[in-house]
Amino acid sequence: MPSLKLTVLGSGTSMGVPTLACHCAVCESSDPRDKRTRPSILLSYDGRNVVIDTTPDFRFQAMRAHLDRLDAVIYTHGHADHILGLDDIRPYNLKQKDVVPLYAAPETFGTLRRQFAYVFDSAPTESSVPMVELHEIRGRFSLFGAEFVPVPAHHGPHMVLGFRFGKAAYLTDFSRVPESSKELLRGLDDFILDALRYVPHPMHSTVDQSLALIEELKPKRAWFTHICHDLGHAETNARLPEHVRLAYDGLEFPVEF
């Protein structure tokens, strides 16, 4: 089977780790795996690069990953920590002399149009603006030979999309997964999912809630993301089952699709 390389560009929560003005043990940790930018992944296959979410840290993440071309962006939802790096796709427009296609639910495009009005208002400008092409997600879709399956989930009162691609799935920022979506998440080799902290949160899954979901769905391996500064990397991993680990910025592994 063909395979892709998955790179975790960012594994942190919306405020990042270290968190501004915080001097806790995790924020002052010397372990590089405790340095977490906002949540995003990169999928590289057949000479193409697809990013899920352009975070406020996207420029730094792309430089760190040596991302020399960008072929598409897929969005999970329209919150600031997942979209605010959109402007930084401009160098790829200029280098590739082409638009970058964006894939998202209609509601997310509504947020993008409001947040980045200058991109979509067609007003004359002497400065460069991101050149994009919008593709609404209304079901399964293919990108460069790989099929992406949207996985709807609840993020507090909001709906978000996770995505399955081959033997892996990515589901950040959720508080509850509907039964119909769970059926899309069975038979996975690798499952990257939200696990903010141990303390309950109205918008996010906790470590214990995510462990219960893993026990139900039984992926071969699971990786926690959207991690806040409550969880130290080494200390938390020591408490988790062997097949469950905290993701970290720069983590890479292959995925069959």
Image (cartoon, rainbow, N blue to C red):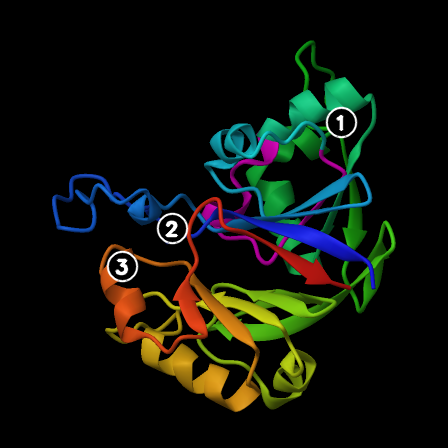
Query: Which residues fall within the magenta stretch?
Result: 70-87
Q: Say which quadrant the N terminus sits in.
A: bottom right
Mark nearest the camera among 1 and 2 is 2
* Quadrant in the rendering for residue 179: bottom right
**Nearer to the camera, 222 or 27:** 222
Label of residue 234 in the image = 3
Q: Amino acid at mark 1?
A: Ser
Residue 232 position in % (x across, y down): 24, 58
Name the amino acid, label 3: Ala
* Residue at 43% from the left image edge and 72% from the top image edge: 244
Q: x%, y% of residue 121?
A: 71, 31
Dot 3 crowding, Cα within 10 Å, few <14, some 14–19, many 20+:
few
SS assignment at label 1: loop
Which numbered mark, 1 or 3, is in the foreground of this view? 3
The kind of residue on which mark 2 rests is: Ser
Return the disc, 1 or 3, that comes first in the chain's sequence.
1
Q: Residues within 10 Å of mark 1 (few under 14, many from 20)?
A: few
**Residue 112's quadrant in the figure?**
top right
Residue 15 screen position, x and y as percent: 33, 47
Q: Which mark is residue 122?
A: 1
Residue lying at 22% horizontally and 39% vertically, measured from the top left: 20
Question: Disc number at residue 14?
Answer: 2
Pick the front one: 214 or 175 = 214
Picture quadrant where residue 217 is located? bottom right
Alpha carbon of mark 1 to alpha carbon of mark 3: how far? 49 Å
Residue 36 colored in magenta in the image: no
Judged left or right of residue 22, residue 70 is right
